Image (cartoon, helix red, strand yellow):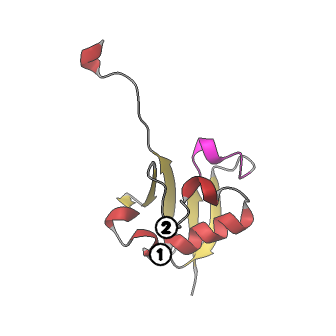
């Protein structure tokens, strides 16, 4: 039985969701939640997942505070009210010692 979860959409992907920063879906796993998101918003899945259906190297997916890579990957089950966060990796800038 699917549960209600919320997917938090990062700013760079909000153009695909009509500006929405959160999308509610019904799902049993992280993979199913992302499938529901992709069904609703064309083009977003390709920005999150690679050709094998796995998270792109510079995209992190969290359930609560846990990275799904440390859990059961996209097979990670979700519970009622869970928040799934899509977080693009951030790189660049200068270290304080370089200033």
Q: Which residue corresponds to mark 2?
A: 82
**Foreground residue among 8 and 54:** 54
**x then y, percent, for residue 96:** 28, 19
Q: Position of residue 4 (x, y in %)?
A: 59, 73
- The residue sitting at 30% across, 12% down in the picture is 99
Instruction: Give the magenta-colored segment's residue range.
Output: 9-17
Magenta part, dominant SS = loop
Say what secondary structure mark 2 lies in.
Answer: loop
Q: Tell me the residue that label 1 is attached to.
A: 79
Residue depicted at x 48% and y 59%: 55
Kindly indicate whether the residue at mark 2 contacts the one at mark 1 (C-beta within 8 angstroms). Answer: yes
Residue 78 versus residue 11 in the image, above or below:
below
Q: Is residue 50 above or below residue 72?
A: above
Q: Magenta stretch containing residue 86, yes or no?
A: no
The picture quadrant where one finds residue 32 is bottom right
- Name the residue located 41 percent from the left edge and 34 percent from the top edge: 91
Label number found at residue 96: none
Image quarter in which the N terminus is found: bottom right
The image shows residue 72, relative to residue 9, as above or below, that is below
Instruction: Tell me the residue at 70%/56% (across/down).
Output: 43
Q: Is residue 38 left or right of residue 18?
A: left
Q: Secondary structure at mark 1?
A: loop
Q: Residues within 10 Å of mark 2 (few under 14, many from 20)?
A: some
């Amino acid at each position: 039985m699917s549960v209600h979860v919320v997917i938090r959409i990062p700013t760079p992907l909000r153009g695909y969701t009509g500006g929405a920063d959160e999308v509610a879906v019904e799902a049993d796993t992280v993979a199913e939640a992302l499938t529901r998101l992709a069904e609703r918003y064309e083009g977003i899945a390709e920005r999150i997942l690679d050709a094998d259906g796995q998270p792109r190297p510079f995209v992190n997916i969290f359930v609560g505070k846990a990275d799904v890579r440390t859990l059961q990957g996209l097979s990670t089950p979700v519970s009622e009210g869970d928040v799934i966060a899509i977080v693009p990796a951030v790189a660049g800038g200068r270290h304080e010692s370089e200033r």
